[in-house]
Amino acid sequence: MIPNVDLQTKLKNLPDEPGVYIMYDADGNILYVGKAKILKNRVRQYFHASTNKSEKVLAMLTHVADFRYIITASETDALSLENTLIKKHTPPYNILLKDDKQYPYIKVDLSADYPKFISTRKLQKDKFKYFGPITQGGAKSFLDILGSCFPTVTCNNNFNKLPKNFRPCLNYHIGKCCAPCIGNVTKEEYRKIVNRAVAFLSGDDSEVRQVLDRKMMTASEKMMYEQALTYKRYLQLIDKISQQRIVVLNKFVDYDMFAVASNGKNCVVNHTMIRGGKVIFSDNNAVSDAGIDEAQTLSSFLAEYCDMVKLCGEIYVNMPLPDADELCALIQEKTGVKTQIFCPQKQDKKRLVDMAYRNAVEYLTKSQTAIDKKYNTTHGAVLQLKELLGLKKLPTRVECYDISNVQGVDKVASMVVFTNGQKDASQYRRFRIKTVEGANDFASMKEVLTRRFERMKADDGVFGKNPDLIVVDGGLGQLDYARQAMEECGVEVQLVSLAKREELVYKLGTNEPTFLPRNSYALNLLINIRDESHRFAITYFRKLHNKNSIKSVLQDVEGIGEKRRIELHRKFKSMENLKAATVEELAEVKGMTRATAEKLYQYLHQE
């Protein structure tokens, strides 16, 4: 790409200082955020004709119309600012790991009087000790194994403030808790149990195997075959994990190995985790990044990835990273772990990094189609949607709205959000229609969008970021009511509607539909968003309708007040379940008596 005159002037005036650079398209949308030790050298590389560029860089440059930069005091600050801006703006050509898998961990506060083991997917810089990531069986299975072999507490009780007549919970009676709540064990005895559990989570499974094997045989002898099968499954899970723990070193060490492989179009980063001298984890991550070289891609990946996986203090990579010191400082700031990054050249560490690289190459070679498909259905679909619909702004954040009701009863609406072509479930919202009478989907859509636009106008952040594109389920009618809401609120947002039968797209300013190719990723993205909003709306409607159905029926039954209605709904969920219940089952509900249960049963089954 040959830069225009204005860009050429800006390139000449770039400073010899560290900072962050931001690439923009012609409509002012952010395409890419990068960091540089020397801004002048890094940014010029993108536009220098003699520089070899990958396909993803060339693809981005076809959209670049301008760039800006922010000077920072150091490269560490640049790395931190880059990370912040990527999370804030979610540029389509940056590494975006926030929507990828979050591995479960088990954590424990060993400083507590009676430590308990908890599952989590959120790593934090706190007092807890974390074990994981757990890639086989899930955290629940591990907690079940811990409960079977090391009976520790699961409750939140303060054992120093319990009444004298306190009774232990069910876990004590089934052997999954040693009940320190009633003084069944001392702190010292409890600590020994915790230490044995920690040893298991750290890799020593010998005691757990013996305990589970003994429990399995005992259950089998007592003809408790389902319980025996459960213990057998636990043993099989431990066997599967042990097969991954290949001893590669004679030292009890913890390392994290990272290797990046690229074919010019796609990149894969492999993470191989060494804990206690054993390989316990190896995973490949397909990434999209428009950095000039693989070292920059790997650096950006690590800056994001350390939020997802608990890394140790020694990181080894398959190529030198120019910003290794700054990256170590950022990881230490995020995790609290003092970190060093090395590029080994010989012996065991080099062999392990080479193994990580071979895994990355293997995944890149054999999964090329899958990697391309993921890109095409997410980032690629967003870019295609902008081009096919002639949108002014790249639809990075798309919101879709749908209305659900039956004959105007229990009217609700849904808002689903896709960010960079992927579901962003944490941003979903649901609404109850407040002002519309009867089954008027048009007016309901206007009410919901008015509430959305008013929040957007107030800029209070209740709904998260502002939408780049709003999709409404329906045709010209729904779109027109959405337009009215937008104009009355005095805001401006890109609006389209998607009609169900022919999957036609309607835009503002014309009554003629836009036909997107049936096999286009852009149309598939719109359909997926619309279907997801419909599913979310229906789910909320059914939940609300079932609750209100039970409430309305029970209002006519003598002896059943608000508290009993709440408990009956909590127990049976729907009218169908309520009618199918026996008198005994009704009487078991909290607050119910036998006499009231009989009255309710007769009322529900009267002719």
Image (spheres, rainbow, N blue to C red):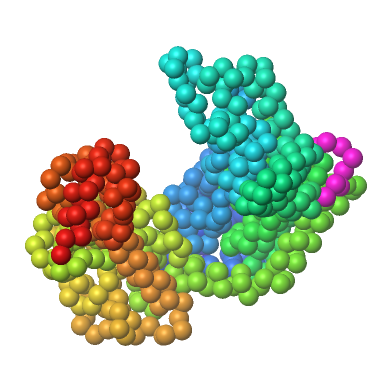
Q: Is residue 453 above or below residue 504?
A: above
Hey, which quadrant is residue 292 in on the image?
bottom right
Q: Quadrant of residue 513?
A: bottom left
- Location of the N terminus by quadrant is bottom right
Query: Percent x, y for residue 490?
Result: 17, 57
Q: Which residue lies at the image location 35% right of the left edge and 77% below the top edge?
A: 389
> In this image, 178 relative to 260: left or right?
left
- Numbered-mark total: 0
Is residue 481 visible from the viewing direction of this image? no
> Which residues make up the magenta segment?
246-256
Confirm whether the magenta stretch covers residue 22.
no
Q: Quadrant of the C terminus?
A: bottom left
Asked which quadrant contains residue 194, the reply is top right
Instruction: Tell whether 336 sits left or right of 554.
Output: right
Please give left or right for residue 535 compared with residue 193 in the image: left
> In the figure, is residue 151 to the left or right of 471?
right
Q: Main secondary structure of the magenta part?
A: loop
**Residue ID at (46%, 55%):** 90
Residue 202: image location, x then y, percent: 73, 37
Residue under the point 71% across and 72% down: 366
In the rendered image, the vertical position of residue 187 relative to residue 602, given as above or below = above
Quick check: 272 above or below 56?
Answer: above
Camera-side residue: 204 or 7? 204
Residue 132 spot, x, y in % from top left: 66, 43
The spot of residue 352 in percent (x, y) is 82, 51
Is residue 270 in sight in this rendering?
yes
Of residues 171 and 249, which is closer to you in this image?
171
